Amino acid sequence: MLLVYTHKITPRFTYTFRHICKRILGIDVKFTSKIEDFIAHDSLKMSYTKQPLSNELFVRSHNLLFEHGISDLDINVQSWDNTKGFFLTGERSDLPFDIFAASFYLLSRYEEYLPHVKDDFGRFMAKESLAYKHRFLSQPVVDVWAYKLRDVLQDRFPEYDFPKRTYKIQPVIDVPMAYYYRKKGLLRTIGGTITDIGRLKFKQLYQRYSVLMGFKRDPYDTFKWIITKQKQCKFKFMVLFLIGDYSTYDKNISINKKEFVSLIKSVADYCNVGIKASYFALQDISILKKEKLNMEAIINRDLKAVRNSFSKLNLPQSYRNIIELEIHQDYTMGYVDTLGFRAGTCTPFQYYDLDFEVQTPLQINPYHCLDFGLLKYQSELDKKEHLQKLIKEVKEVNGTFTPVFHNYTFSNLERWEGFRSLFTLILDSADEG
């Protein structure tokens, strides 16, 4: 067990140390403000304060973990071996940067509470982030820093046997529209037909009626392939269905259709199932509650996971609504158009509410790759290369790689050509050394 001495034990302090020490390094950690308890401890120990007590392992603390609320911080990012760091500590510290304050800044999404430019959907953009501006978005720096702490502890306590964690994959399949042509109802089918004719899309019109008459499989109906892939894996996929009402933003088929309910049930027999919260559920907790209850009625078990439409997050309200409804896992934390680590980590972490200064029960599962983020790379070779780089970064810290793909990504549509093999590449990375 690691004992940490500090001058003041705060919720921010305990939250950050537990993520780095327990979740990433697998070390139990306890805290004390009593010097005599610290001196008496005969295993791993370090001090985290302004001045060292004597010659113990010491990291000089930044003020961030002892503050309340949000302020405009002056952050100077510098190179540090193979990574970047900020919150410089000074000569006497055993680490050149306060990795705990820096980790808290990234995990709490501190910068997303500060004024920033949003995109058309009201989302925080990658270009606004500290990680993008200083070119460390493609590295899970919090995990890299944790391993640097482990190296320092190992040097000071060579007899201690550190636990080892293993690389994991948590694939997410997002289902905003289960079928492209089927089960849309008469009015939507007529509307789609008129649109096809009006835009001279005769190939699409032919495909539409080939599907409706049963001659061809619906292009979005890739669930047989998904389940086959799931059967080949030891780990479970998380499949998130949009079951909200039809709107401008959400165009899935109705859950009053028996075939749609049957599809969800059949997928739930093999995979973990959650909801993709509809666009209007993001603002209205009563709509989110309705969608949660509807899904629970279909799968006959408590709903555990949610992902917001368009990867939209309004902090802190989005997460507070999820917590109030006792949903324990979120898969929204990531960027839609850029690969990388929005929260700086590839380890699932608890959401910290900066307004209430409390760690919540909500587990954030940050995703590192959305299929749309791969579209900007022209060739399949480029896509594969960037994906492999990302996987390599996660493997180096034995983290959890979380990709988000859509059901239509596995279709034979020209736009998504080669994506089945990219998804398979991710799944195969679990078996590689």
Image: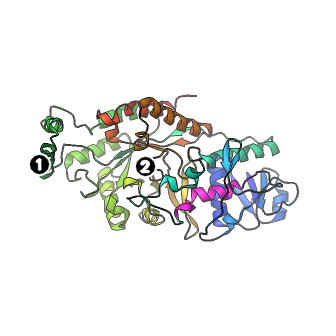
For the point 47% across and 55% down, which residue is it?
Answer: 125
Q: SS at mark 1? A: helix
Task: Please report the residue visible at 83 percent of the width from the left and 64 percent of the height from the top.
Answer: 35
Quick one: label 1, few (<14), some, or many (20+) residues within 10 Å?
Answer: few
Name the residue that disc number 2 marks: 336
In the displayed image of the protein, which residue is found farthest to the right? 54
Name the residue beneath numbered marker 1.
Answer: 190
**From which residue to which does the magenta span run?**
94-112
Element marked by disc 2: loop
Check contact, mark 2 vs mark 1: CB within 8 A. no
Mark toward the start of the polypeptide (2 vs 1): 1
* Residue 156 in picture, x, y percent from top left: 82, 45
Q: Position of residue 341 (x, y in %)?
A: 54, 48
Judged by its main secondary structure, the magenta piece is helix
- Asked whether residue 334 is in view, the answer is yes
Residue 69: horizontal and vertical position, in percent? 60, 71
- The three-letter code of the residue at mark 1 reads Ile
Q: Residue 392, how many percent across, how many down?
A: 57, 35
Cα–Cα gap, marks 2 and 1: 32 Å
